[in-house]
Amino acid sequence: MSNLDNIKRNPGPAASAALRYGLALASVVAALGLASAFQYFHLPQTFGAFALSAIAITFWYAGTAPGIFAAVLSSIVRDFLFEPNTSAESRILFDLVFLVFALLMTRVARMRNQLELRVAERTAELTQLNDNLKCEITKHKQVEAELRLSEAYLAEAQRLSHTGSWAWSPPPGDIRYWSEECYRVQGFDPKGGQPRFEEFLQRVHPEDQARIVEVIDRAVREKEDFEFDYRIVHPNGEIRDARSIGHPILNPSGGLVEYVGTIIDVTDRRQAEMERKRLHEAQADLAHASRMTTMGELTASLAHEVNQPITAAVNGASACVRWLTRDDPDVREAREAASGVIRNAKRAADIINRIRSLSKKGESKRQFADVNGLIRDIVALLRNEANRYSISIHTDLGADLPKVMVDSVQVQQVMMNLIMNSIDAMKEVEQRRELAIQTRRADDSQLLISIRDTGVGLPPQHKEQIFDAFFTTKPDGIGMGLRISRTIIESHGGRLWATGEDSQGACFNCTLPIPLEKPDKTTADNTNG
Amino acid sequence: MSCPKESKLVAIVDDDDAVRGTLQGLLRSAGFSSKAFESAEEFLGSDYQRETACLITDIRMPGISGLELQARLNAARCRIPTIFITAHGDEEMRFQALRAGAVEFLPKPFDDEVLIETVRAALDR
């Protein structure tokens, strides 16, 4: 805009005043020279015509004031040099002609100036428009570059996630857009151009085709989303697992315009899932095998645990019979003895159930459980094993501990392994043999279970090694117990580690995370099977 | 430690509450009075050794075992007729117990007639 203001303020020629008045003088002198030359060769007198030309040139190139100056100058020159003797009327007429011409030229010059001003304005406008356009183009180019970059990122993301995107108009339309990754996933050559829907269907496993068509037909009819899994048969015979999701785009009046959606190659993910499942099963099998080995070692002790309540039941039954068959039967005593029989028979059944649940090979099941209850049960089973070596077990189980989300059998297996290890470590020692089991809340997020013994202890260099597979210090051990125990605890989000000085007994510590959600009524009560 | 024989008291040492309790009940039904202890230590620490005419003890217990209890009583010249009851007694253990002066070695669960007769015989000594 400043350009335009400038033009309005200085409408005349940009030359300096001296130059402009110089032009007036020079043009009149030239007219004089030309007229003198005509006079010399006795040609018709033409100073008037030359003077008018000089005035016109001066007006045109030098502006109004120099033009008037040229007119005055021409008038003087003509009066004194060419026709000094003409009458006053004739001189006035000539002067009048110059004056009219000067006025005319003044107007012409003004019109020219106005025209120039308009041209300048228009030019400025056009320049502005041009600048704006250039700016727009730059912006456009920038947006285009950003778009290209974004597209490249998207393509890369599609490649990495094996996810292609598409747009499809239901019949009578066809596939409208088919991303690069779609070609790859579906096994098409991008050079072959966008496939038709029929071609897409041909790549689908024959057993899946009818189902897919049905799913799509129904979705189109209902104008709803669709989602289906299917197998792709690539031209080389390779079969891939895929999943497609489609979403309808409707126009404002509710008519179906097209479907947009994705195709995802889920083969790798599915294989990884299966691998994980197999690994999980293998771990469960190993844990079960290890559990069975331990239970095998414990057969005598477990039999004793079952035998105790059976002995008590038999005692009670014998007493009951004796009270009833006396000369003077005592029904009250007999009833009391009989209820003892029931109690003890139930206890025997409980113990057998506990042993059975430990030896069962089932799916790993996570449920809310009370750690103290799990420990009490396992201590009950191992009490006799401890007695065998004159080991006393002390438990210090924290009150009001929150329930944890665990596979009870697996956690009991860990407890069993740790207690059995401690018993093994104390078999040979001469000093007191004590096993202390403690549970408490370590912090807001986890429970801590520690099992401390007064056995031979752990050499510092073995504190971590004992958790390696096949590492054992026992003559008949296979070195899997602690490895499996750690795997079990870690799979529950906890930790298992050993502390304690050499020759002062060992301490095994185990943490289990406290779940954020609280057990509801249906899952709360399952401490023991 | 001296062990008078006038008493008819039967002492029971077993760490299992249920076995201990029902054994007392069985003896009561047969007309015997008994006193129960949950460990050998508790029995040794009590004053009942002198009054005890017959001792029924489990072999496998935390702390002092039944066989060790017998050995300690023998060492203290307190020869109480002792009946061992155990869930897993092998021949060697049986032999060792009988050699140390046990009057009977019964596997759990035991026949009440055998136990009662043995106790009666011990008390009649």
Image (cartoon, coloured by chain):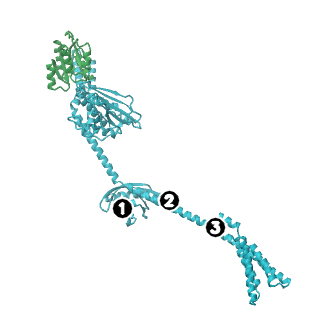
Chain colours: A cyan, B green
Image side of residue A215 versus residue A392, left or right: right
Image side of residue A447 versus residue A62, left or right: left
Residue at the image position 32 percent from the left and 50 percent from the top: A272
Judge whether A115 appears above or below B115 on screen: below
Judge whether A38 appears above or below A302 on screen: below
Image side of residue B24 versus residue A18, left or right: left
Image location of residue A431, percent across then percent down: 25, 24
Q: Quadrant of residue A393?
A: top left
| Circles 2 and 3: CB atoms closer than 8 Å | no
Image location of residue A25, percent across then percent down: 74, 77
Image location of residue B78, percent across then percent down: 19, 13
Image location of residue A223, percent across then percent down: 45, 56
Amino acid type of the residue tagged 3 in the rendering = Ala
Q: What residue sits right under mark 1 in the picture?
A: A201
Chain on which label 1 sits: A
Q: Quick one: label 1 or label 2, which is nearer the N terminus?
A: 1
Chain on which label 2 sits: A
Q: Quadrant of residue A329?
A: top left
Q: Is residue B56 visible?
A: yes
Front-lying residue, A299 or A99? A99
Screen quadrant of the N terminus of chain A:
bottom right
Q: What residue sits right under mark 2 in the picture?
A: A251
